[in-house]
Amino acid sequence: MAGRARWFVVGGVALVVVAVLAYWLGSSGGNGEEAAPAPSATPTPSATLTVPEVFDRVGPSVVVIRAGKSLGTGVIAAEDGTILTAHHVVEDAKDVTLTFADGTRAKAAVVSSDPKLDIAMLKPAKLPEIVVPATLGGAAAVGAPVVAIGNPLGLAYSVSTGVVSGLNRSTDKGGLRGLIQFDASVNPGSSGGPLLDARGLVIGIVVSIADPGGDEAFAGIAFAVPIGAALGGDEGDGPPGDGPQI
């Protein structure tokens, strides 16, 4: 009889525990879902940068180029310091001097040049302490925002913004083809500088402007060689555009 009594007590305690659990689960909606924290959405980082962020990212990759009387812009395109610029900036120059973003000055040699594409590559004799190559790539799309960084009229590290106005343009002067047309402000001294998309990728190298007044002043139409062509890809073809080299 004592053994049976003990079993009845244990069984009664078990029933009480089950009842308490059932009540607790029932007060939570009957399935325990409120016991776990509700999931929250993980923010998806945006690939689009603000203009100041684009400048902060790419500004250290931009260089001022002086070649004789010519002033232009270049962009560091590789870890070894190789610089992309416009061919006409350094054409026939015997002395090419670079000024990097940190103030480092160095002579440079023209290691390759393509007058047909108006693209040249330079090799600096000395590099800054920290080399910051730009990221090359990306595709241009009509209406997409762009940023240009350069040295227009000697105003070093100037930033302008706009959109891609057209693709596959050509120029009568110089016979350039397959160009990106854009409306970010550029002027003499901007040539060779990077044209950037909203992610800070170099999508083109600035080479010329439209100049209906013949005064080499920006009229709202500028052109850049697509980065694929600048690196040796297809140069493309397209409807006419006109403009002097800057």
Image: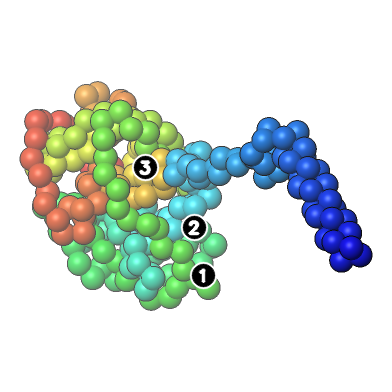
Residue 109 image point, x, y percent: 29, 71
* Disc 2 from disc 1: Cα separation: 9 Å
Secondary structure, mark 3, is loop
- Please report the residue visible at 14 percent of the width from the left and 56 percent of the height from the top: 233
- Please report the residue visible at 30 percent of the width from the left and 28 percent of the height from the top: 143
- Quarter of the picture containing the N terminus is bottom right
Residue 77 image point, x, y percent: 34, 62
Determine whether label 3 and label 1 are within 8 Å by CB.
no
Question: Mark 1 sits on what residue?
Answer: 130
Residue 34 image point, x, y percent: 69, 38
Determine whether label 2 and label 1 are within 8 Å by CB.
yes
- Please report the residue visible at 40 percent of the width from the left and 58 percent of the height from the top: 134
- Please report the residue visible at 43 percent of the width from the left and 70 percent of the height from the top: 106
Question: Mark 2 sits on what residue?
Answer: 60
Q: At label 1, which amino acid type do we have?
A: Ile
Q: At label 2, which amino acid type do we have?
A: Pro
Whether residue 123 is visible here, answered yes or no, is yes
